């Protein structure tokens, strides 16, 4: 009994000696080229609560030049629970000391490994982050928006889901070589939301874990080498956070992880203390179940060799406010997402998806409306309207994907860096399926002169309701050339798929033009009546050039004039619309002869 107590006391004293106190000078380092197989040392990490514990390492090999200016140290670990669990996801960043000198950070492991073998990132590679300052620009994934600004994706729910799934996979897929295990916890989403998010983030290569809310004000003490550390991607009523271990502290400068989070370069995210609640052994990869505590600073860099943050600072994030109404029930969610052009859109999509997945009848054919007041606010620009109605089994994908994808286009535009002031969403859900299919179109006459008005009757069949006949007037343009016009009636999605170019389309060449284009997008709960004719249409400097003669088309297509866009089969010469109470589906066509004046 005395021997066991003596071992515990000795281990605690050694851990205290190796872990510098807050404000102490960082320890000396041992260069990579001095490390040899057979050396032994110690590591520091947290296995329970916030207490820093020691484990043992034996160097079994070195792997120089695994990448440009990148090396790896191989070590066998032992002590504490490691014989049972193996290397734990969340230990990344645990400092490794050899003869009192800091060798690096435990950073990599191998799934299904039979021994606790780890890859260690040399500390010299991590220290390069302390000399880098300011935005690097390498987090920008600019999406060019020439003739087609990419808005057509808003008409395909599967396209939106695939788009964000690929973005998430791409973020994690940037890591190469031995697998860095990034534990990501989800708090406040409920069982249904957690399961939906765990599936997606797990498929992307992260280690999803159930988290808990309400811990943001709990003081975890000052960060020091071996402390558990958290990085919040989303904070507030719902949270998404990555966790790991602190490697090195010098004043308010903190290095951790030993591998990238998403390798985004310059970032600005909340950095927190963290507490280990339990260990989860697994044959594939074991992990620490950790919850974040009080914010202590801001993460500023996410590099191939690790992450770097500053204590005592606060990050700038994008505030999101979501009001969800389901009949008489209302819930309000207040959360912030990372202000990053790659992270923010995906986080908005998955956060909203997670919230909706825990509501009644997830995935059922229902109706979701982004009501008036749903906007993206930008500093110095008009608000971007998101109001629309979505009905059907994929309504949740549209409700989450529409604001997220528009945010992606705004943050990755090619003209200027937008300042996103906030996002406000008003989501209203109805159990009934509010759809209506356009089934018929008749005109009061089938020949007319330019400038005259034609009355159209559109027949609509609502879901499980009697047919409705609706009438509207279509004014034919004065001075239009004679010939056949194709008259189409239907919903915006079917009209877009038909290849018809609607009237007053302007291709953007500035951010404010693009915002105006988004704000004039046709809504799903409107019936559109278009008079279209075949046309070769081009765009130059943001202006459409319709009704071009063949000689002009040939010149513009030569590439010498800066013309953009592909030929449009049909272009609208007249358009009108009227609102209804359901999402419009279907498309019908009639032909009208436009006589000469």
Image (cartoon, grey):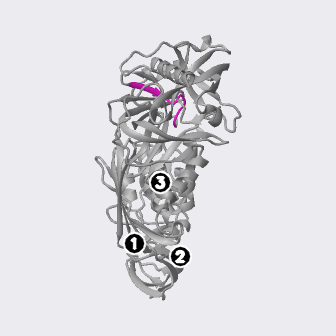
Choose top left, top right, bottom left or bottom right for residue 20: top left
- Give percent across and percent down for residue 125: 53, 21
Q: Nearer the viewer, mark 2 or mark 1?
A: 2
Q: Vertical placement of 336 versus 443: above or below?
A: above
The outermost residue toward the front is 1
Q: Separation of disc 2 and disc 3 at Cα?
A: 30 Å
Q: Position of residue 300 (x, y in %)?
A: 41, 31
Between 114 and 540, the one lying in front of the other is: 114
Q: Is residue 147 visible?
A: yes
Looking at the image, residue 528 lies above or below residue 277: below
Q: Of callouts 3 and 1, which one flags the residue occurring earlier in the amino acid sequence?
A: 3
The span picked out in magenta is 253-261
Q: Earlier in the sequence, mark 2 or mark 3?
A: 3
Q: Is residue 121 magenta?
A: no
Which of labels 2 and 3 is toward the front?
Answer: 3
Residue at x 50%, y 58% (from the top left corner):
191
The residue under label 1 is 479
Tag 3 and tag 1, C-beta contact below 8 Å: no
**Quick one: label 2, few (<14), some, or many (20+) residues within 10 Å?**
many
Q: Which residue is mark 3?
A: 349
Residue 453 relative to residue 103: left or right = left
Mark seen at residue 587: 2
């Amino acid at each position: 009994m005395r021997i066991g107590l003596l071992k515990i006391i000795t281990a605690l004293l050694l851990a205290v000696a190796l872990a510098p106190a807050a404000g102490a000078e960082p320890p000396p380092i041992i260069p990579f080229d001095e490390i040899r197989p057979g050396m032994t040392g110690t590591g520091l990490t947290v296995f329970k609560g916030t207490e820093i514990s020691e484990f043992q390492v034996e160097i079994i090999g070195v792997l120089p030049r695994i990448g440009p200016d990148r090396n790896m140290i191989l070590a066998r670990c032992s002590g504490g629970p490691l014989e049972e669990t193996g290397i734990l996801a969340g230990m990344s960043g645990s400092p490794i000391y050899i003869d009192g000198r800091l060798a690096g950070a435990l950073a990599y492991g191998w799934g299904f490994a039979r021994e606790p073998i780890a890859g260690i990132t040399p500390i010299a590679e991590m220290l390069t982050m302390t000399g880098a300052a300011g935005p690097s620009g390498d987090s920008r994934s600019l999406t060019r928006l020439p003739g087609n600004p990419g808005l057509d994706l808003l008409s395909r729910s599967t396209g939106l889901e695939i788009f964000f799934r690929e973005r998430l996979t791409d973020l994690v897929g940037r890591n190469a070589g031995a697998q860095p295990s990034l534990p990501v916890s989800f708090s406040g989403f409920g069982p249904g939301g957690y399961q939906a998010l765990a599936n997606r983030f797990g498929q992307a290569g992260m280690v999803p874990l159930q988290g808990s809310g309400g811990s943001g004000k709990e003081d975890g003490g000052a960060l020091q080498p071996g402390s558990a550390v958290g990085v919040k991607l989303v904070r507030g009523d719902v949270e998404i956070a990555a966790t790991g271990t602190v490697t090195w502290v010098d004043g308010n400068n903190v290095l951790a992880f030993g591998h990238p989070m998403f390798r985004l370069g310059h970032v600005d995210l909340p950095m927190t203390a963290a507490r280990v609640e339990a260990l989860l052994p697994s044959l594939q990869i074991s992990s620490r179940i950790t919850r974040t505590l009080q914010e202590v600073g801001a993460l500023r860099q996410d590099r191939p060799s690790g992450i770097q943050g500053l204590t005592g600072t606060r990050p700038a994030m994008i505030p999101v406010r979501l009001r969800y109404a389901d009949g008489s029930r209302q819930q309000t969610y207040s959360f912030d997402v990372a202000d990053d052009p790659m992270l923010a859109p995906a986080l908005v999509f998955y956060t909203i998806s997670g919230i909706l997945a825990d509501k009644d009848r997830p995935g059922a054919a229902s109706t979701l409306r982004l009501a008036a007041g749903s906007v993206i606010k930008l500093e110095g620009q008009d608000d971007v309207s998101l109001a629309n109605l979505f009905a059907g089994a994929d309504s949740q994908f549209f409700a989450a994907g529409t604001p997220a994808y528009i945010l992606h286009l705004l943050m990755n535009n090619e003209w200027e860096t937008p300042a996103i002031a906030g996002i406000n969403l008003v989501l209203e859900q109805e159990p009934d399926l509010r759809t209506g299919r356009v089934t018929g179109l008749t005109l009061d006459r089938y020949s007319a002169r330019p400038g005259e008005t034609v009355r159209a009757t559109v027949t609509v069949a609502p879901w499980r309701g009697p047919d409705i006949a609706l009438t509207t007037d279509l004014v034919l343009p004065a001075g239009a050339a004679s010939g056949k016009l194709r008259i189409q009636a239907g919903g915006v999605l079917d009209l877009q798929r038909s290849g018809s170019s609607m009237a007053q389309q302007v291709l953007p060449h500035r951010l404010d033009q693009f915002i105006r284009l988004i704000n004039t997008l046709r809504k799903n709960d409107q019936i559109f009546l278009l008079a279209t004719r075949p046309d070769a249409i081009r765009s130059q400097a943001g202006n459409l050039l319709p009704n071009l003669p063949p000689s002009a088309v040939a010149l513009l297509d030569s590439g010498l004039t800066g013309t953009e866009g592909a030929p449009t089969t049909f272009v609208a010469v007249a358009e009108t619309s009227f609102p209804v109470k359901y999402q419009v589906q279907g498309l019908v066509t009639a032909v009208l002869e436009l006589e000469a004046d």
